[in-house]
Amino acid sequence: MEDIRDCKGHLVCKAEPSSGNVEAAYKRQLTKTTLAVGAKFIIERDGVRTTLTRKSNTEISVDSYEFPA
């Protein structure tokens, strides 16, 4: 699994492009999901929104930006 970081450099989750598995851990809570090709997963934390999109079996794109609270 590869580390996914937000625009501030914080570790947001881990993802595996070939299987679509995503694991996000935060404050003793673990969230696991499997993304189909074309599916999106959004994580909002500390004023930053990070969107993962599974483009293919070899690529997960990451878009991350700060938003006003």
Image: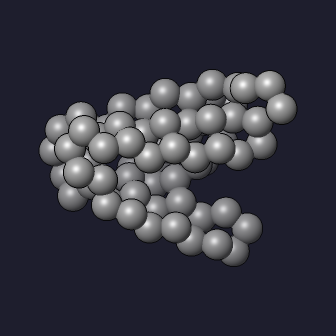
Q: Using the image as rendered, state which of residue 1 and residue 35 is in the foreground.
A: 35
> Does residue 7 appear in the picture of this structure?
yes
From the viewer's perspective, is 16 left or right of 26?
left
The part of the image, by quadrant, that contains residue 66 is: top right
Residue 5, placed above or below residue 27: above
> Residue at the spot x=30%, y=44% of the render?
39
Where residue 53 appears, as percent x and y from the top left, is: 35, 37
Q: How is the image coloured?
A: one colour
Where residue 58 appears, as percent x and y from the top left, is: 18, 40
Q: Residue furthest right?
A: 69
From the viewer's perspective, is 21 left or right of 62?
left
The part of the image, by quadrant, that contains residue 30 is: bottom right
> Does residue 1 appear in the picture of this structure?
no
> Residue at the spot x=46%, y=62% of the render?
23
Give the mark count: 0
From the viewer's perspective, is 38 left or right of 43?
left
> Residue at the spot x=76%, y=36% of the render?
47
Quadrant where the C terminus is found in the figure? top right
The part of the image, by quadrant, that contains residue 16 is: bottom left
Where residue 52 appears, as percent x and y from the top left, is: 42, 39
Q: Residue furthest bottom?
A: 28
> Residue at the spot x=45%, y=54% of the render?
14
